[in-house]
Amino acid sequence: MKGRVICMVQTRPLPGSYKNSGEGIGAITEQALEETGILAECGVRTVILQNMGDMPVRQQSSPEAIAYLTVVGKAIRKEFPELSLGILVNWDGVAALAVADAVGADFVRVEHLYTGAEVTSAGILQGQCCEITALKRKLGSKIPVYADVWEPHGIPLCPQPLDEAAWQCVHEAFADGLFLCGKSAKESIERAGQVRKRLPGTSLYLGGGANGENVRELLNYYDGVCVATWIKNGDMSNPVDRDRTRYFVEQAALAEDIII
């Protein structure tokens, strides 16, 4: 990943999803390109394309979501080749890897669910590490896969301690790095400390909860931070706020380079 700020590019509801009201993939793609352009202008160097507008979804993505997100990803890759591009398909890591390989993306984020099992609003999700690693082997893919551990919007079934769950992601399921996120900045810092003690050499990224006021502190504990809602004034359906994005990037640039 390039830089220490990661911004989400979240598409409007794709054709076939519940909230899509007839908008075609052309208009949706243009909106995603416009948003990506604003982020790039503000100094963002890494983005993650996500179909957040398709909620609610089960773990196995629909064929049309995979196809349409590939169209959007291809357009972003062509228009902004200088950016580091990640793919996050709700909530299907296998589909995310397929899209990433098709569009030539730089990495995949698996938010729900790489290892273990958890309860979400859409039911029980199960770890996809076996299927993801099998697809990597089948495709001969070298695309890094970053896995969320203890994603805060799900409830783990028979949870392992956080550091053990993180260790299993890396050493038993071969994740290339990890995303963490607590329900507050304080909890996110505590979680980073637990995981770094067990996995000192593993890349660690904050999955959410960063804002312009806390990003400098958080970057003392994380290799990078992911932001979405804050740069949209608290609502994912809002457009990206240029001023907030610039401020966030500026504050991140002031963070110390030493990871504790």
Image: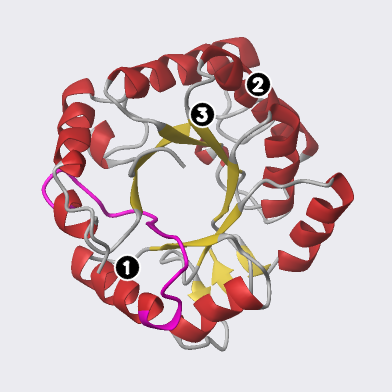
Q: Which amino acid does the dot numbered 1 rest on?
A: Gly
Q: Which residues are magenta?
A: 197-214
Q: Position of residue 87 (x, y in %)?
A: 59, 40
Res 117 seen here: no
The question of residue 153 being in magenta is answered with: no
Q: Which mark is residue 11?
A: 3
- Of residue 27 and residue 115, the one placed in the foreground of this image is 115
**Which is nearer the N-term, disc 3 or disc 1?**
3
Q: Are marks 1 and 2 in contact (CB under 8 Å)?
A: no
Helix or strand or loop: what does disc 3 sit on? Answer: loop
Q: Secondary structure at mark 2?
A: helix
Q: Residue at x 27, y 63 (%)?
A: 259
Amino acid at the residue labelled 3: Thr
**Residue beneath disc 1:** 182
In this rendering, is residue 139 above or below 83?
A: below
**Mark before the other along the chain sequence, 1 or 2:** 2
Residue contact between numbered discs 2 and 3, judged by CB atoms under 8 Å: no
The amino acid at mark 2 is: Lys
Q: Quadrant of the C terminus?
A: bottom left
In the picture of the structure, the residue carrying the numbered disc 2 is 74
